[in-house]
Each structure stands twice: as structure tokens, then as C-alpha cells.
Amino acid sequence: MKELVFNIADIFNSKTTGGCLSQYEATSFHIPAYQRGYKWATGPNGAVTVLLNDLWHAFEKQEDEYYLQYITVKPLLLADRSNYLEVIDGQQRLTTLSILLSVLNLLQADSTNADNIACNKLDYAIRANFFDEFIYAQEKLAEVIDTNWDEFIAEDIERLDRQDIYYLYGAVKECANFFVDKPKLLHDFKGYLFKHVKLIVNSVEQHIVSETVFKNLNSNKVPLSEVELIKALFITRVGRDKVKRSDSHFREVMEVRLGLSRTWEDIQQWAQSNAITSFYFDDKGSSLHELLKLTALVMGAKQTELVGSQLGNHSLFNFFSQQQSTQNGFEYLISTQERLKDWFDTDEIYHLIGFCRFAKNSEYKRLSFLKECLELPTKTELTSFLRKKKSELLFGKNAESDDKEALVKNLKYGDDDKQIHAVLLALSVFPKNVIRRFDFDSFKRQEWSLEHIFPQTPEGKGHVLTDDEKQNIKHILASDGEESEAIELLLKQASRTTDEQKVYVDAIRKNGTLDNIGNMCLLTGGANSALGCLFFDGKRQKILELIQRGNFVPKHTFDVFAKMIAGLDVDLKQWSKKDIDAHAQYVASTILNDIKDDA
């Protein structure tokens, strides 16, 4: 679809190149037979009355631009060789405007049919002569206004007693009644209507079947999105602003619009790529809509003002349309996209932003966080800001603690899950002496989560303990006394009840080993579920299989199961208490050194 914005004067203009009709070499709008009859009602909540009140309110406030949403049209050559614009959607709005303009023209002194810009601009397939006879002819229109419904249809009851004509008649009467007590303001109102009230015109290609478009638009299958409305707003208004407003510059206007359209398409293509959508916009339904919303926030919009913008109230479109300079809005969009792209392409900033947004339960996933980033004028200030946020995610409310190493070593699963997740993620996102971009898109799509290295349910899912695994449990416990003897006896049994399993699991948890950060790692959701309750060797084999199949496994997780971390036992079959303690020390010291490097 092509989208352009026209004021009301140009909507009905077929004489100069700035007009909607003349741009398509059309003489009038055609309302085809498949369209529903006119049904806009009057009364307190009727669409005609609401439109009149809204227009008058905008006039009184002298809003610079007031938008009546959109109409969808298609160039059409009829059998009589006349060129028309077929109205696929928006005929109710266009018809009401034609009636309003005709009544307004009638009520002004010394006006003639020639002064009515809507005259002869609507061609109805099923009401071929109605507008010519009753709306455009001033004398007849005056009679309609002064006649009640019964008297009106009595002239030709067979032809006029129709539902759509009843609503057309009602619209005429409502417009006349609305303007009757405002004679001194009608000239100014007409001028405001012509210049400041606007429609977005969407044009579909000639080869597209009109009835299909009509059915889709009117069954809400393919609603015109707010993004499309904003695109039309930017391209049309900015194009006009960039050149002088005159017919001689029409070709230049179109060339500028073409350039703006290409810029828009480049931004849209970038925003809709999987990596960008995942990284910046949390896989929302329309990443371009999110980018436009972020642009609006940067320009000063309040989050509450934009709530529900995709649900039909078009609050985001309204925000941009109410700006004094649309060009300013488009330039903000370009600037915002360019900065986001630059950050994405700059490894350090990419990793810092990604870490802040993808850490578990992070509050920095919202657009408000990106807005804060965009408010910082330099990369140096941005980097400093992001490093501070990184520290807060790693250490929580204890970010200013003097003994951060002990703080990290004492993190416990169940109590500190958010921080543990952040710490383990940081080990893979910010590895030392490794030049490799972290794949945040895979991280998100594969749903990484915390996993115990030594299983917290060793006999879960019907697993039968081997002798080596029983020995591993005893080494993890590393305790003496009656409890140790009782567990020794339990492990000698061929199998154990759930309550009996709980005895040794509780003992492991009690000694602080099981839920210690040294016994935790991150695995993708698919790998996590596949690994189940396996011991170290079983998990290691599964992870190797995942790597061989090309699955993404984080560097830190790989280092754990390859036992490439200093201080770990060389035994690749078991994960011992010594390994847990050494791993906890490694995690704490590595994170501490990383933070020191950031300072």
C-alpha cells in the first residue's frame, strides 16, 4: 500500500497536482456496489454527531492538525472510460464529509455550487443520482433540511424509503442543526476544515481484488496498523516540509517522499531482524512499533500516554501528529535507530546492555531502560552507567559491600536465585581474554536456567544409583557419626523410598553443599530437561552431545563440565565437595576481578 496524507481541501481536489484525485488522474471517488449502505447514525452517541463535535472542538482549540484516520482506495477505470478512485474502506467517513461540506456551503451567504469542493466528487454505484439530486443541488438540499422524513419520502416513496437514504437524510439534518446557531463562525470553521483536518489515503495496487481487501479490513483480519499510519504521517508531512508548497515542486516532493520511504524501509528491516527484536524489543508483536514508542519516550511522551496504542486508540500516532514539527519526530526516529545500531555493533556496550536486559527477572527489560541509556550523550557516560547497573545486578543491595568475594561465595540457591543467575551469566558474557560475542538471542530462545551440577534429586525419574554414584554421595556428605552410618545403611539398599531418599538429600543440603553457588551452572531449557537428575558424568556426556549437534552451550558451563577451571579435580566422572568449593572460589574471585576491571 501507498500512504499519503491530505487535508480536506486536497482530498476532493482534482484540478491541481497537490490534490488526492488529481494525483491518481481521477475525477471522483467511486463507492462500489459491494459496499454496505450508509449507516452513520445521529443522536448523542451517533457517529455523525460525534464527528461534528470532535471537529468543532479541534477548531475551538485551533489544533494544528486533526486526523480523521484513513480511507483505502484503488485507481479504477470504469466502462465509460472515466477514471475514479474506488473507495474500498472509509466510505462512511467520506460520505459524511461530503454531506457536511455541502451543508456548510449552503449555509454561507453568496455561496454557489461551484464553491462546494465536494460537489460531484462521489459516485455511488447503487445510488447513482441521489447526491446529484438532493445533496449537491443547493435548492434541493435546502428543501431536505426544511422537510421531515415522511414528507421527504412522499415525493417518491418507492425510491426513497430505504435504510441508507434514511441515514443520509439524518446526516443532512444533523449537520444543519449543528451549524444553525454558529453563522458568524462558519467561514473560519470552513477554512480550518480545509487546511487543518486531514485524512490518510492508502492506495492499493490495481491488480489486487478490491472485495478481498474490503472483507479483510472490515472483518479485522488485516487492520491498518498504527505503524502504517505513522509511516504515512512522517513521509507525507516531512516530504512537504522539505520543499516549498507549490505545484511546481510536486515532482520534488515525490522524490523526497521516495527517499524518506527508503529510509523508513531500512529502519523497519533492521528493527524486524530476529537478533534486534530479541535484543532490544523483547520479541514484542511489532518491533518497529516498540522503536517508535521508544522514540516518543525520548521526545518527552509519558508512558501512561502511550498505553493501549496498538489496541485501537492510536495514542502513539496522536503523539507524533500533535508535534509542531513532524520532521523533528522522523529525525528522532533516525537518530534513535542509529544509536541503537551503533551500540549493538560495539562489543562492550552490546554485552553490557545484553547482560542488564537478559539477567533473570531484570527490571531493565523495559523501554524505560533504553530511554535512560539514550539520554546519556556520550559512550563514556553510557558505559559507566551500564557498569553500575551490572554491579547492582551482581551484588543486589550489597553493591557497596567491602567483601564482595565472600558475598558471592555465600550465595544460595532458593534464596539468591536472581543474583546467582546474574553471576553465572556474567561469567559467560564477560570472559577474560576471549574475543567472542555472546549470543543473547539463543540464550533467550533456549531458555537458560539454573541447574544443580550435583543433582538435588539423585534418584529422580526412576534413576537407579550406581556404585560410583553412591560413593559420590558419601564424598559429598563427608560426615561422621550416627547420621553418616544411617545414610551408609540406606545406600547399601537396592532401592529407597521417597522418604528414605529425602534423608540423605536433606543431609547434603544441611551441610551447605547442594545449594551453594559452587554447585550451580546455567543450561539451556532443552539441555536442562534432557539432563534431568543425572550425575556429573551423565550431564557431561549430554552436554558434549549438545555441542556436537551445534547447540549453544555457554562458555562457563562448558568450562565446568570440561573441568577447565583451576582447582577442580581431574576426575571427569564425579563432581566432589572439593570441586564445589573450588568452583565457588573461582566464581567469586573471577567476578570480583571483573568488577575491579570495570572500575
Image: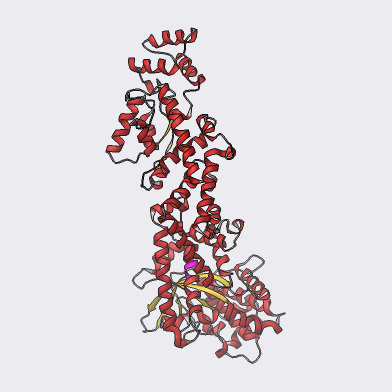
- Is 324 in front, or is 427? 427
Chain part drawn in magenta: 228-232
Is 101 drawn above or below residue 537 in the view shown? below
Assess whether residue 31 is covered by the magenta stretch.
no
At a point 40% along the width and 44% down the height, the residue shown is 445
- Is 389 in front, or is 535? 389
At a point 41% along the width and 57% down the height, the residue shown is 272
Q: Would you identify the image quadrant in which residue 153 lies? A: bottom right
Q: What is the x, y in percent for residue 27?
A: 44, 84
Q: What is the x, y in percent for residue 552?
A: 34, 41
- Left or right: residue 241 versus residue 189 is left
- Left or right: residue 254 versus residue 151 is left
The residue most toward the left is 548
At a point 63% along the width and 79% down the height, the residue shown is 151
Q: What is the x, y in percent for residue 420?
A: 49, 35
Is 285 drawn above or below residue 315 in the view shown? above
Is 427 drawn above or below residue 127 in the view shown? above
The residue most toward the bottom is 110
Q: Would you identify the image quadrant in which residue 7 lies? A: bottom right
How would you classify the magenta stretch by its main secondary structure? helix
Is residue 314 something one can see in this rendering?
no
Q: How many numbered marks, from 0 up?
A: 0
Point out the image quarter for the N terminus: bottom left
